[in-house]
Image (cartoon, rainbow, N blue to C red):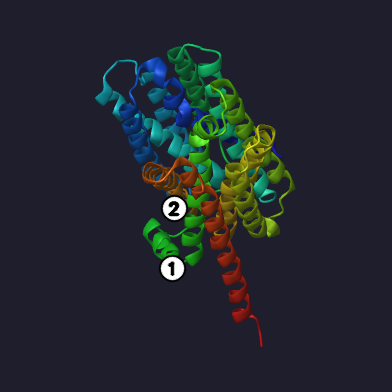
Amino acid sequence: MPNTTKWITMSAFIAMFFLGVGVTIVGAAARHIGLTPSQIGILLAVQNLGFMLSVIFAGAFSDTYDKTKILFVGSLILGISFFAFYLKNDFSLNLLIMFFIGVGIGTYEGVTDPMLLDIHKKKESLYINVNHFFVTFGCMMITFYLLFLQMNWRRSLNHAAIAVFVLAAYFLFARLKSGQKEVDSLSDRLKFLRQQKLVFILFLATICATGLEICLIGIMTTFLMELRDFSQVTSKIALIIFLSGLALGRLLVGLFTKREGILNLIIFFFGLSTLILTGLFVVNAKGVNYVLVFMSGASISALFPLLITLGGIMFKDMPGTVLGIIKLALPVGGILIPILLSVISKYGSLQLALMLFPLIAFTGFVIMLYAKLSQQCARQDTAPG
């Protein structure tokens, strides 16, 4: 790997680490800041709005403009936002700052994957999985830093801001050796993609994958404490075990996945997670629960990176635009599935609501099995004779 390519790859991984920090910072620092549940919800909603706008436009622009310069702008926005967040205790001002945190992390999400696909023509799955491993790593580290080590949250954000400014300086001077490809205008690309059924299929499957990941992280400790008699300490340990399964799964799947097997692997992991999540929410034995928690994280770990890799490979002439559209499923899945979970638990029970997770996994399995069957039919239709 050429030296420039190596450093750009590492810079993408570091950017995704800070995406993890940006996603987690409100939840991790909420009690230090003194935020109410209502304020947390509003802040996260505004962050998601900034993320949605940024991921689609940054992804689309990455097909026609220098990716490192887009990442420079995103890093500058994120660094300033980290430094300014709750510097003053004005909720309206911090709502605006939170929007720009969403814009910054959305830029990272929208550009780093297409950039890695552009500079690594082989082992795409490895680099995309490792890229998203660093998101999980960032989530874990900021949680450890603030909750377990009881560090000053304001100082930690200042440190993060300084690191992101350094990253911005690197992106400003970095140069990608591969030139930008000639592509159609954004309107022409979107018109073409509207006719591609696979993009919509990947979008729906990504809603399932990201909804599982986001909601399981959010509900895990509550489930274990209310239905499995875990304590505050043991439930947090179990959450770390879940995140460890998530992180390790991404690394291992990335190492051993071959390009031609990605679709089959996605179908396999959706099916596997259906079985494991059913076991997690049905079996009640503490020792087994720890194993099932780890396996749950591992079984869903690679779904999102593999879906992203598949989209980038199938539409290699416009990966930024395609992945930007697919990644809109991140906030959609992170909003729709928690609402369903809340409604079912309110009018039914928590145990009933939890069975939504294996149902979502099975839905993803059916969606991707349909994609495979459609692909096979298309090949038969185009075969000679």
Q: Residue at x 69, y 32 (%)?
A: 287
Say which quadrant the C terminus sits in. Answer: bottom right
The residue at 39%/64% (across/down) is: 191
Q: Tag 1: residue type?
A: Gln
In the displayed structure image, the side of residue 382 where residue 341 appears, left or right: left
Q: CA distance from mark 2 to mark 1?
A: 14 Å
Residue topped by disc 1: 195
Q: Percent from the top left, x then y, of residue 125?
A: 65, 48
2 or 1: tag closer to the N-terminus: 1
Q: Mark 1: give few (<14), some (14-19) or many (20+) Cα within 10 Å.
A: few
Which quarter of the figure is the N terminus placed in?
top right
Number of numbered tags placed on the structure image: 2
Which label is found at residue 112?
Answer: none
Asked whether residue 321 is in view, the answer is yes
Element type at mark 1: loop
Amino acid carrying label 2: it is: Ile
Q: Which mark is residue 325?
A: 2
Give whichever of 124, 212 is nearer the camera: 212
Q: Is residue 117 visible?
A: no
Q: Residue at x 52, y 48 (%)?
A: 357
Residue 349 image position (x, y, % from top left): 43, 43
- Above or below: residue 326 compared with residue 240: below
Q: Picture quarter containing residue 185?
A: bottom left
Within 10 angstroms of label 2, few (less than 14), some, or many (20 or more) residues?
A: many
Please, what secondary structure does the residue beneath circle 2 have? Answer: helix
Vertical relation: 236 (above or below) 260: above
What is the x, y in percent for residue 38? 31, 29
Name the image quarter holding residue 331: top left
x then y, percent, for residue 383: 65, 81
